Amino acid sequence: MELKIDHLNKQFKDKRAVHNVSLSLTEGVWGLLGANGAGKTTLMRMIADILTPDSGTISYNGTNIRKMGGAYRNLFGFLPQDFGYSRDFTVKDYLEYVAALKDVPAGETGKKIDYLLDVLTLSDVKRKKIAKLSGGMKRRVGIAQAMLNDPKILVMDEPTAGLDPGERVRFRNFISEFSHDRIVLISTHIVSDIEYIAARNIIMKAGEVVDVGTTDELVRKIERTVWNCTVPEKDLIRCEEKLRMINQRSEDNRRVSIRYLSETPELEGSVPAEPRLEDLYLWYFPQGNTEL
C-alpha cells in the first residue's frame, strides 16, 4: 500500500503554503511536525482531496486520487482541527448520520458505532448532545467519525488535543494496533504522542519537507547537542538568557537541574543527554514556538 505525493504545490495569494512536497507514505503511523504556518494543514487537506493542489499529484497505489472520486473517499478517514456537527445532534445520532454519508452498510453501522464508543470511552454519553460535551469528549467523537468506515488511510489533525493523560495512552495503543495494515498520518502539538507511536516522522518548515525518518534516525542527528547540568538557583536567569533551554527542575539545596541545546557544552559540569524528538523539534525551530 502506498500513498505517493509527487511535487505538490499550493499558493494562497502571496503565501506559499506547500512547496514541491514529495513523499511516499506506506503502512504504519507517520508523524507530521512543524511550527504554525509550516503547511501541515494545507498538506493534509490536499491528501483528503478537499483542497485542490496548484500542481503536483497524489496517487493511491498508482492511481491519481482525483480520478478515484468516491472510491477514494470510501477508504479515507479524516479528522480536521474543527469537525462540523449540528448542535442538535447527540453523539449516537451524529455517528449514524456520518455512517450514512460514508455508505457504511446499515447492518454494520450499529456494531461499528458501539465498538468505537467503547474504545473511545464514549458509551456513557452517546445520548448526550455533542454541544454539551467537554472539549476532550468532542475530540473523541471526531476520532470516532473519522474511523467509522474502517479507513485504509487515516489523517488526523491534533487528535489528542483536550485528552487527559489516560485517554492519550488509550488512543496511542488503539492507533498503534489499528495502523498495522493502514496508513495513518498524525499532526499533533504533543510531541510525546508522536514519539511513542510513529514509525516515521515528517518535518515541515515554511511549506517544505525538510527531513523524513524514524525517530531514532532523526534524533541521531543531534547527538551531543543536548546537555544536562545542575546550577545554583541564583544563576538561572543568566542561563535562560544565554542558553537555548529545553526545561528545568528545582532540586534540593537551592539548585536547579537544566536541559539545554548547544553544539558544545556551555556550562561547567554539563553532561550529554540522550536526545528526544522534542529536542529535535526545538533544534529545528529555535524561535521558541512549540506549537506543531
Image (cartoon, rainbow, N blue to C red):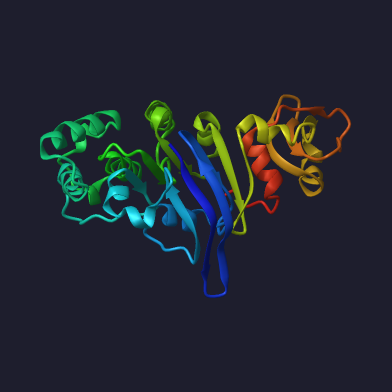
Q: Does 75 sit left or right of 43 as displayed?
A: left
- The image quarter containing residue 87 is bottom left
- The image quarter containing residue 243 is top right
* Residue name at image x 19 percent, y 51 percent: 101
Check the image and report above or below for 112 versus 54. Answer: above
Q: Residue furthest right?
A: 268
Check the image and report above or below for 234 versus 197. Answer: below
* Residue name at image x 32 percent, y 52 percent: 68
Q: Residue furthest bottom?
A: 13
Q: In this orientation, does residue 292 appear? A: no
Residue 6 placement (x, y as % from top left): 53, 53
Q: Nearer the viewer, residue 224 or 246?
A: 224
* Residue name at image x 40 percent, y 62 percent: 51
The quarter in which the N terminus is drawn is top left
Residue 218 placement (x, y as % from top left): 67, 36
Q: Nearer the viewer, residue 123 or 38?
A: 38
Check the image and report above or below for 219 versus 44. Answer: above
